[in-house]
């Protein structure tokens, strides 16, 4: 699929990539946001092409580097030839996919995989949720990749310090957040520490959900999607292809936001009214979905 082309033929949705080092929690996060677990979450690095996930019921397929398409099965994702595959297209009926596409990237510095496997997908991207391991946060390899990211993408991106439960003392936690904040100054729209493990375990417990970091993060994510929706209404070209947001043509008319992307706070309901969900039950409503629904 070429840059700017939409799966449905309609106006395209913002495309949010999940990026970072291997095992940082990219696939776990994609699954958490979708409230379903189609992507493998592995202790060891997975060798998987970028998985571009959109709303719908179409059968999955792979897009070869030459542009040809071929049906694939979910159970067989890990046997798809990585170097020859541009991306895997997956269609699911998760609520979050009604307002954005998610692209689950492979780890950035897998020695067994050429970086072109993920680099060739970058021009499709509007924003990134970058997952960095709390115990080795913001390595040189991560900062090197981020340095090359256009400002238009950076300012709409979120840095998630994942696996935060692996830091045992308050002193360690505060030190990591301070250092990463200092080292990435001005390079992300926002930074959040999060334990995806605790977010999954939180179930319907709001206090645990907020304490995991997932509450503040998902509230911010809704703001980002709202902003991106306004931007992508003005251009078919993904923001990666813009040096600056000022390159986007001015709006002809104020974009009309889908109801689901309206701020949750507009409804006058507090975060406490919005229940997180447990992706371990096959409930298709993820935490973000519920926040969107409550608007
Ligand atoms: N303790 C803890 N484990 C986590 C957390 N997030 C993810 N994990 C675990 O880390 C492992 C790797 O997670 P994935 O989601 O597969 O990581 P990934 O970034 O997609 O990894 P690759 O696709 O291989 O690059 C899995 O075993 C997850 O359960 C977290 O916040 N805390
Ligand atoms: Mg993964």
Image (tube, rainbow, N blue to C red):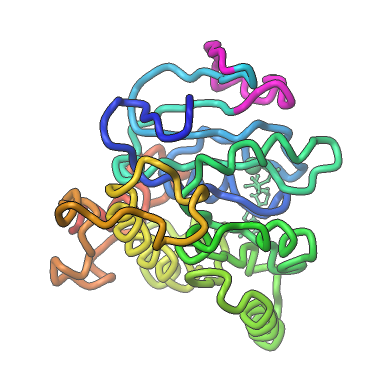
Query: Residue at the location (27% across, 47% down)?
Result: 233
In the displayed orientation, state which residue is furthest to the right.
111
Position of 273 compared to 35: left or right? left
Residue at the extreme bottom of the image, as rendered: 171
Q: Quadrant of the C terminus?
A: bottom left
Instruction: Classify residue 190 as left or right of residue 122.
Output: left
Q: Nearer the viewer, residue 204 or 158?
A: 158
Residue 75 x/y as whole percent: 58, 20
Q: Is residue 170 visible?
A: yes
* Front in this rendered view, residue 262 or 227: 227
Q: Is residue 77 magenta?
A: yes
Q: Residue at x 57, y 47 (%)?
A: 28
Residue at 46% across / 42% down in the picture? 102
Q: Is residue 90 above or below residue 291?
A: above
In magenta segment, residue 256: no
In depth, the one of 90 and 140 nearer the eye is: 140
Quarter occupied by residue 51: top right
Give the total of numbered labels.
Answer: 0
Which quadrant of the structure image shows residue 291? bottom left
* 16 is higher (above) or lower (below) than 2: below
Residue 175: x %, y % from top left: 69, 85
x and y, in percent, of residue 65 in the image: 64, 21
Where, by quadrant of the figure, is residue 180 drawn? bottom right
Q: Is residue 8 left or right of residue 116?
A: left
What's drawn in magenta, residue-wise? 67-86
For image coordinates 43% across by 49% down, the residue present is 33
**Do we see residue 201 in this rendering?**
no
26 vs 61, nearest the viewer: 61
- The x, y position of residue 186, in whole percent, is 56, 76
């Amino acid at each position: 699929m070429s840059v700017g082309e939409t799966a449905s033929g309609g106006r395209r949705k913002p495309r949010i990539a999940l990026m970072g080092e291997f095992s940082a929690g990219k696939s776990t996060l994609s699954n958490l946001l979708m409230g379903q677990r189609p992507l493998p979450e592995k202790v060891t690095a997975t060798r998987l092409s970028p998985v571009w996930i959109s709303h719908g019921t179409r059968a999955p397929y792979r897009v070869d580097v030459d542009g040809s398409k071929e049906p694939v099965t979910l159970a067989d994702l890990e046997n798809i030839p990585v170097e020859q595959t541009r991306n895997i297209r997956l269609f699911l009926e998760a609520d979050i996919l009604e307002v954005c596409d998610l692209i689950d990237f492979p780890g950035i510095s897998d020695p067994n995989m050429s970086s072109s496997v993920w680099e060739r997908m970058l021009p499709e991207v509007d924003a990134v949720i970058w997952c960095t391991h709390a115990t080795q946060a913001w390595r040189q390899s991560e900062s090197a990749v981020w340095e090359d990211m256009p400002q238009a993408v950076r300012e709409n991106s979120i840095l998630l310090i994942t696996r935060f439960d692996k830091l045992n003392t308050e002193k360690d936690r505060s030190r990591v957040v301070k250092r990463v904040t200092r080292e990435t100054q001005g390079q992300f729209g926002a930074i959040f520490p999060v334990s995806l493990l605790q977010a999954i375990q939180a179930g319907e417990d709001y206090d645990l959900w907020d304490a995991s970091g997932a509450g503040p993060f998902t509230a911010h994510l809704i703001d980002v999607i709202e902003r991106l929706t306004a931007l992508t209404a003005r251009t078919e070209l993904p923001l990666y292809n813009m040096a600056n947001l000022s390159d986007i043509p001015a709006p002809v008319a104020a974009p009309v936001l889908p109801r689901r992307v309206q701020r949750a706070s507009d409804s006058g309901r507090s975060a406490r009214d919005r229940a997180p969900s447990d992706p371990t039950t096959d409930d298709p409503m993820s935490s973000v979905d519920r926040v969107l629904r409550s608007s």
